Amino acid sequence: TALVTIYNINKVYSKGQVKTHALHNISLSINKGEFISISGPSGCGKSTLLSILGLLDTPTNGSYQLANIDTHQLKVDQRSQVRNKHIGYVFQSFNLIDSLTVFENVALPLEHRGMPHADIKAAVEKQLSAVNMDGRLAHKPSQLSGGQQQRVAIARALVGNPDLLLVDEPTGNLDSQNGDAVMQLLKTLNENGATVIMVTHDERYSQMARRQIRLFDGKILVEHKEAVA
Ligand code: ADP
Ligand code: ADP
């Protein structure tokens, strides 16, 4: 069964008299284990779609089922609970907390859950090892390269074992070498079981996903799915 089912999603932003129809009747079904890229020109609705999938924003109409939960029925506090349990989110600008160490940044989502300290330590060290950052536990984000910061941000997003990893322009602030390394990491994490949905305007990186969705003017223009070998 599908992990994500969205059906006829529309998003209209209204500001006074100005309305922007950012998404038009988007329907998608996403299974566990997929690696999907969402690409298209600036303003086509990529971030809007990702924010809706991440429960950071709500559609104007249409339905969204996540892990058999009808997200429309959720109250505000339930939405954030569902988000914390099921979704890991990675931003273009890393969004790490500069005053905390690498270890503390990755531990944060588990501390919010009230996990025992020993379990947090084990989970954080395991996750930082999975992104090849286990040698930098006591560093502050400012002491790391952009690529290393993004790997820590990916560890923070995955440490709570979310069903869905949502990644918004992960390479947007990186040079090509660091960008390639972050993409390779996402590919490996997917091969090890993570379900990944990534927004990118970089054609080269969108082609690394097994399923590629291209948006134009808030609509799905084309969808390409890698043939099963
Ligand atoms: P992309 O991520 O592909 O660049 P966005 O999802 O950010 O596209 O934006 C899609 C459209 O919706 C654009 O026309 C954008 O200007 C508009 N838009 C996005 N966010 C808002 C907002 N908070 N208020 C009003 N319009 C918005
Ligand atoms: P990106 O393409 O990197 O997502 P955008 O410029 O589309 O960058 O959007 C950056 C932020 O500004 C997003 O949070 C988006 O929702 C918001 N935004 C985009 N367009 C508008 C707009 N016309 N009015 C208000 N907020 C907007």
Image: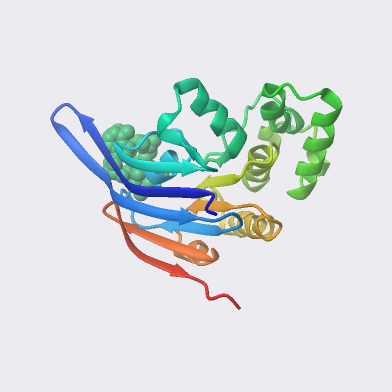
Q: Quadrant of the N terminus?
A: bottom right
Count up the numbered dots: 0
Residue 140, position as x, y percentages in the image: 71, 31
Observer able to see residue 190: yes
Residue 68, position as x, y percentages in the image: 52, 42
Residue plotted at (41% across, 54% down):
28
Residue 153, position as x, y percentages in the image: 63, 40
Q: How is the image coloured?
A: rainbow
Choose between 89 and 180: the one closer to the eye: 89
Observer able to see residue 169: no
Residue plotted at (76% across, 49% down):
130
Choose between 171 and 163: the one closer to the eye: 163
Q: Quadrant of the C terminus?
A: bottom right
Task: Name the quarter showing ligand 2.
Answer: top left
Q: Is residue 18 above or below residue 39?
A: above
Q: Is residue 178 above or below residue 133?
A: below
- Going by the picture, which residue comes out furthest to the bottom? 229
- Going by the picture, which residue comes out furthest to the left? 17
- Going by the picture, which residue comes out furthest to the right? 118
Residue 97, position as x, y percentages in the image: 63, 27
Residue plotted at (52% across, 62% down):
205
Residue plotted at (67% across, 56% down):
185
Q: Is residue 107 left or right of residue 55?
A: right
Q: Is residue 209 left or right of residue 7?
A: right
Choose between 37 and 142: the one closer to the eye: 37
